[in-house]
Image: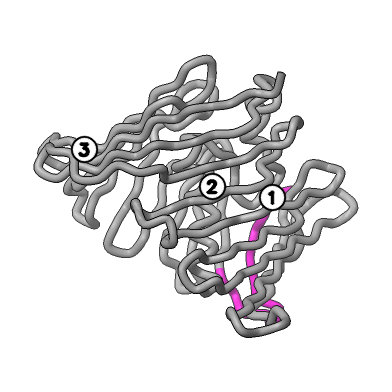
Amino acid sequence: MNSSLKFILLIFIPLFSFGQEKDFYDLDNSYHEIYSNLKVKSLTVSTKEFENGKLKEEYIELIQDFAINGDIIREREFYDSDSTDGWDVKYKYNDNHQTIRTEWTWLDDKDQDLTEYEYDSDNKLIKSCDYYKSTNATEFLLEECLIYIYRKNRIFKVKTAENELKNYYKKKGDFIFGYTANKKLKYKYKNGEFVYQNMDSIIFRYDRNDIGQIIKTTKTDNSGNLTFSTVYEYSNGLLTKVVSKDKNGILRREEDYRYEYYE
């Protein structure tokens, strides 16, 4: 898996798994605080997919395991009812509750991807490196390292170890705008929360409640035409149900969230 795909997945795993997340650069696992408070041990997501409003497929999409402090320690996600199609991710953290390592195993071909994160004495992310190992290989090979440059206590630029610009960020009022090296707007944050992403021909927008949890996402084309919308339901702060409909309001997908707790 290339670094761009992993970068996207790192953004969307917390987004679609929990309906909430902080700035993905923080990597401090802060969106799991509620899991610690409620002593969540595991999460299982059951998904139903519909076609023309009728049930097409039903399967377990996501299984996550948590430490007692709320850290996610393992995640298994599946694309469909074929349990060999998906990935298995393991997480490690430092003493400051920050992610220092994610190890991905792809269930179909058993290839592996590894990302390691480095922080400075002020607990700021300063470097991340991606590695890849094929099924038959014995060692991980370095793919790319990213360097995070700060201005006014926030990330200003992201460059490769070879000094190639990848992304840069500008703050205006309550918003932070993220751009590609060729000055294309890719991300928007409001009060530190992710609210917009431009995936070239697809644009995602995220509405949040007062505590930052996502309550609705919309997917449009570049002209603003709605193609998909998703609403999120919560109980006691935990995501319980996600419902997606197409542009005509026809049901396309339902996710039910079930939790187990530490005693």
Q: Which residue is drawn at 70% across and 26% down?
A: 36
Specify the amino acid type for callout 1: Arg
- Residue 155: in magenta span: yes
The secondary structure making up most of the magenta span is strand
Residue with the mark numbered 1? 154
Picture disc at residue 245: 3
Q: Report x, y in % for residue 248.
A: 10, 39
Name the mark nearer the viewer: 3 or 2: 3
Please state which amino acid type lies under the numbered disc 2.
Ile
Q: How far apart are the two marked residues, 3 and 1, measured between alpha carbons?
A: 36 Å
Query: Closer to the N terminus: mark 3 or mark 2?
Result: 2
Kind of residue at disc 3: Lys
Q: Where is residue 44 in the image (x, y as percent from the top left)?
A: 49, 36
- Residue name at image x 58 percent, y 26 percent: 260
- Whether 139 is drawn above or below 69: the answer is below
Q: Mark 2 to mark 1: distance in Å? A: 10 Å
In the rendered image of this protein, does residue 99 appear above or below residue 216?
A: below
Decide which of 227, 134 is in the foreground and name it. 134
Tell me the SS state at disc 3: strand
Q: Which of marks 3 and 1 is in front?
A: 3
Residue lying at 76% horizontally and 31% vertically, measured from the top left: 69
Q: Mark 2 points at which residue?
A: 176
Residue found 63% across the figure and 80% down from its top: 143
In magenta, the rendered stretch is: 153-166
Residue 157, percent across and down?
64, 64
Magenta segment includes 220: no
Mark closest to the chain's N terminus, 3 or 1 = 1
